[in-house]
Amino acid sequence: MTEHLRTPPVITIASGVHLPAVGFGTYLISDDEASGAVAAAIDAGYRHVDTAEVYENEAGVGRAINAALGAGLRRDDLFVTTKVFPGNPAAGVAAKTFETTIASLDASLGRLGLDHVDLYLIHAPLTPDERVDQWRALVELREQGKTRAIGVSNFSQVHIEELLAAGLPRPDANQIELHPWSQKQELVDYLRATGISPIAYSSLVPLSTWRAEEGHESAKTSEMQAASEAADSPFASMAAKYGVTEAQVLLRWGVQQGYAVLPKSTNPVRIRQNADLFSFVIDDEDMAAIAGMDRGAGVAWSIGDPTTFA
Ligand code: NDP
């Protein structure tokens, strides 16, 4: 058995910037709940937390982080990501400019109670006319030391090439929906060839419990939900074979692909379980079987997979 697969990996995304491969996701966790959930995650060993301006929980996330720092955790032992919401002109939300993008990170840092984050991302390619200016702002913010690394989220190859064509530095990372049903192999190959780290979100889409709560919307179809609930689910048999849960199989798949993963839960048992990915290895036969399960675009955004947007 390959020994390195048994050690939690740390992914180098830029010079001197190391991303712990298991991060705690906080989308759909309210500001009130966030401090308890993030505290439970830090207690369970997570050292990477993912939030965003648009999640409206940065203050709660920040309270848990600052409590942990007050109790002796070192700031450089923790990796914090947040994202600027770029606006969405198609839905009537004004696009951010260079200046308002700069101001957004200052506001996020204020809510988080931190003087810098480790990774700052443009949340999605929703602003065709302002994307390049927003990226210029992230480059400036890195120079100011307000973020150690910069990246994008939900960007396709075309969106990234637009930034490079403007003569700007490449993103350190691209956070995208990646799981056995949305593998985006061409995009991942491009990211790897370009030196951009893929970070996987919504790893747990194939679970029947994924966003099952009322009001937790997505584009997951009823046909997909039926596949999640099927008694002969391939993930259920793999989970039985390795003596773990289906969630652990899905997250382990991401880690074995070399991605950082960002499981979200408000359940303390699941929070612990989702970080426990290093006592088993998915074998080559099962990895090959999963490679054949791709169903195309992601479903986490109810308006469609943003990597397909113009
Ligand atoms: P996840 O893939 O982390 O799945 C979360 C869902 O699965 C919840 O409904 C949760 O319910 C359930 N769940 C979690 N653990 C288990 C388990 N062990 N067994 C059974 N069910 C479980 O979904 P997300 O879509 O939240 O993605 C993860 C993170 O990625 C987000 O929180 C966010 O940080 C980031 N993200 C980024 C996006 C972007 O556009 N950049 C888009 C979407 C996500 P419960 O809480 O009740 O346990």
Image (cartoon, grey):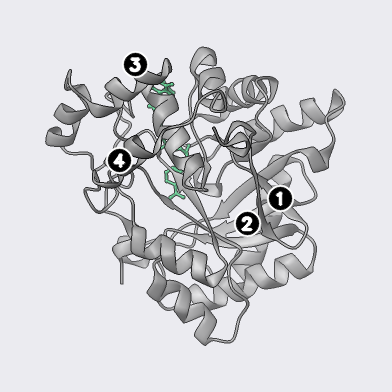
Nearest to the observer: residue 92 or residue 203: 203
Judged left or right of residue 109, residue 153 is left
Quarter containing ligand 1?
top left
Residue at mark 2:
120
Which corner quadrant holds the N terminus?
top right
Nearest to the observer: residue 135 or residue 292: 292
Residue at image location 33% in from the left, 28% down from the top: 210
Disc 1 to disc 2, C-alpha distance: 14 Å
Task: Label 2, secondary structure: give it.
Answer: strand
Disc 2 to disc 3, C-alpha distance: 38 Å
Q: Are marks 1 and 2 in contact (CB under 8 Å)?
A: no
Q: Residues within 10 Å of mark 4 (few under 14, many from 20)?
A: some
Residue at image location 34% in from the left, 57% down from the top: 184
Disc on the earlier residue, 1 or 4: 1
Q: Amino acid at mark 1?
A: His
Disc 1 to disc 4, C-alpha distance: 28 Å
Q: Are marks 3 and 1 in contact (CB under 8 Å)?
A: no
Residue at mark 4:
290
In which quarter of the view is residue 59 placed? top right
Per the rendering, the mark at residue 18 is 1
* Residue 204 seen in render: yes
- Judged by depth in the image, the label closer to the viewer, 2 or 4, is 4
Judged left or right of residue 169, residue 224 is left
Task: Label 4, secondary structure: give it.
Answer: helix
In which quarter of the view is residue 58 placed? top right
Nearest to the observer: residue 276 or residue 78: 276
Q: Residues within 10 Å of mark 3 (few under 14, many from 20)?
A: few
Disc on the earlier residue, 3 or 1: 1
Label 1, ligand 1: CB separation under 8 Å: no
